[in-house]
């Protein structure tokens, strides 16, 4: 790890931290809070916020997303005419706090009348997302340098996608993505409790959203759901499938996050909830580093 103790972290002139864990446990909350902290004239105190999802949506999948919008627009005669004459411009407006265009593009498999897409198309888009996520994470070391060289930020916070654990092999010490990340940042797992897991499931049940699954896990999940429901692929309620898969996904990801955590430190969602200022954040990280050192 790039910091070995709480004292080492506190004394470091450059603080570089990567947050990972399930969506909804506080990664973006912490990143936004640090980004909004004041940077003085000497470049001290401020944090550069690198959002992996934002990078995916604006750099690596932006064209896929925009083309999907255009395909839908071409179905409307008026918009078709305007597009064919370059009279309108269609683009996504992704922000750090609104990733809806990316989620919409990933889509949901199932009945097209209920917003579903063919399973083969769903798999293709999943593969695009996996490659985009890997590329966005491999960009992190370069952005660490850019943040300081261009903007003067010495502190760097990386807000990862909830699916980061699906595209790395943390048990492999030579995994290129894990190596690139751990060599440049302190990896911090935000670990939720069973109560958090239940709340995340309830929240997802109210508003299902597209997720990324490892290909083998997705195929198994899809076959199991079709068998259980006794329906064909085009009869599946897309939201019902997502709800079915989400609870399974929480359990599937937990050991993969735990494997990643061996490259860094672990904090709890309860600890994150107590963080209100950058100083609180530094205290939490220093405490977790010392805790790991004690139990090493």
Image (cartoon, rainbow, N blue to C red):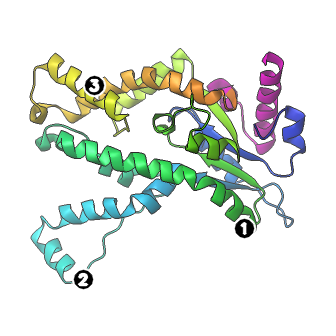
**Residue assigned mark 2:** 87
Q: Quadrant of the C terminus?
A: top right
Q: Nearer the viewer, residue 7 or 279?
A: 7
Q: Which residue is mark 1?
A: 151
Depth check: 137 or 34 in front? 137
- Horizontal side of residue 125 vs 255, given as left or right: left
User: Few, some or many C-alpha atoms within 10 Å of disc 2 (few <14, some 14-19, many ≥20)?
Assistant: few
Nearer to us in this view, 170 or 150: 170
Where residue 86 sits: x, y (%)? Answer: 24, 82
At label 3, counting other C-alpha atoms closer than 10 Å, the crowd grade (few under 14, some 14-19, many 20 or more) is some
Residue located at (72% from left, 35% from top):
275
Q: Position of residue 110 (x, y in %)?
A: 17, 37
Q: What secondary structure is marked by label 3?
A: helix
Is 64 situated left or right of 3 in this image?
left
Q: Would residue 116 be seen by someone viewing this image from the given angle?
A: no
Q: In this rendering, which labeled residue sits more in front, label 2 or label 3?
A: 3
- Alpha-carbon span between mark 3 and mark 1: 45 Å
- Residue depicted at x 51% and y 37%: 168
Q: Earlier in the sequence, mark 2 or mark 1?
A: 2
Q: Please tell me how crowded label 1 is: few (under 14), some (14-19), or many (20+) other residues with Cα within 10 Å.
A: few
Magenta residue span? 267-296
Which residue appears at 39% of the width and 62% of the height? 62
Gap between marks 2 and 1, in whole Å? 37 Å
Residue 221 — which label?
3
Give the mark nearest the N terminus, 3 or 1: 1
The answer to if 143 sits in the magenta stretch is no
- The image quadrant of residue 58 is bottom left
């Amino acid at each position: 790890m790039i910091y070995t103790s709480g004292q080492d972290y506190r004394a470091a002139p450059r603080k570089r931290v990567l947050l990972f864990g399930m969506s909804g446990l506080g990664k973006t909350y912490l990143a936004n809070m640090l980004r909004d902290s004041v940077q003085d004239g000497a470049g001290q105190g401020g944090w550069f916020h690198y959002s992996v999802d934002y990078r995916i949506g604006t750099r690596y999948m932006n064209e896929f997303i925009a083309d999907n919008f255009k395909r839908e627009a071409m179905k409307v005669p008026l918009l078709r005419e305007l597009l064919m004459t370059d009279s309108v411009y269609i683009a996504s407006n992704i922000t750090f706090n609104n990733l809806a265009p990316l989620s919409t593009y990933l889509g949901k498999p199932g009945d097209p009348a209920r917003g579903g897409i063919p399973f083969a198309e769903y798999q293709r888009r999943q593969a695009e997302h996996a490659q985009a996520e890997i590329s966005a994470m491999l960009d992190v070391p370069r952005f660490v340098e850019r943040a300081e060289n261009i903007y003067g930020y010495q502190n760097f916070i990386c807000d990862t996608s909830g699916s980061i654990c699906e595209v790395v092999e943390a048990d492999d010490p030579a995994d290129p993505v894990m190596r690139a990340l751990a060599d440049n940042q302190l990896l911090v797992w935000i670990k939720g409790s069973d109560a958090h897991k239940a709340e995340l499931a309830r929240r997802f049940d109210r508003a299902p959203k597209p997720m990324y699954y490892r290909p083998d896990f997705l195929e198994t999940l899809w076959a199991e759901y079709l068998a259980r429901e006794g329906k064909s692929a085009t009869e599946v309620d897309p939201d019902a499938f997502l709800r079915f898969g989400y609870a399974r996904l929480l359990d599937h990801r937990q050991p993969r996050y735990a494997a990643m955590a061996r490259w860094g430190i672990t904090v709890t969602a309860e600890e994150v909830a107590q963080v209100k200022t950058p100083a609180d954040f530094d205290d939490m990280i220093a405490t977790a580093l010392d805790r790991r050192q004690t139990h090493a």
